[in-house]
Amino acid sequence: MVFPHKNPGKGALNLEEHLLISGTRQAIETAFGWLEARTGISEANKARSEQGLLQHIFASLVAVGLDCA
């Protein structure tokens, strides 16, 4: 995913920039909230390796796919 980020050194955002960032961040937060509610994906922070993290993520996505089917 590519999304705009705030630049702390830039100062205040104009209205157009604020709306773009707010809308994009809201969509991302909604998607992650949906994933968390269905998979408990935040538990992935307990993974001890990159392979364990990826395994947890893929297993969670498969579980969502099976639940939606």
Image (cartoon, helix red, strand yellow):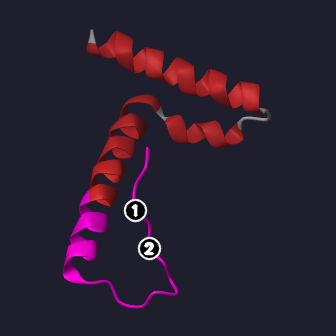
Tell me which amino acid carries mark 1. Answer: Pro
Q: Nearer the viewer, residue 29 or 19?
A: 19
Residue pointed to by mark 1: 4
Magenta stretch: includes residue 37? no
Please give the range of residues in magenta.
1-23
Where residue 69 sits: x, y (%)?
A: 27, 8
Q: Is residue 37 above or below residue 2?
A: above
Q: Is residue 17 above or below residue 4?
A: below
Q: Between marks 2 and 1, how big is the CA–CA gap?
A: 7 Å
Instruction: Specify whether residue 15 is painted magenta.
Output: yes
The amino acid pointed to by label 2 is: Lys
**Looking at the rendering, which quadrant does residue 66 occupy?**
top left
Residue 51's disc is: none
- In this rendering, is residue 10 above or below 47? below
Q: Please report the residue visible at 25 percent of the width from the left and 65 percent of the height from the top.
A: 20
How many numbered marks, from 0 up?
A: 2
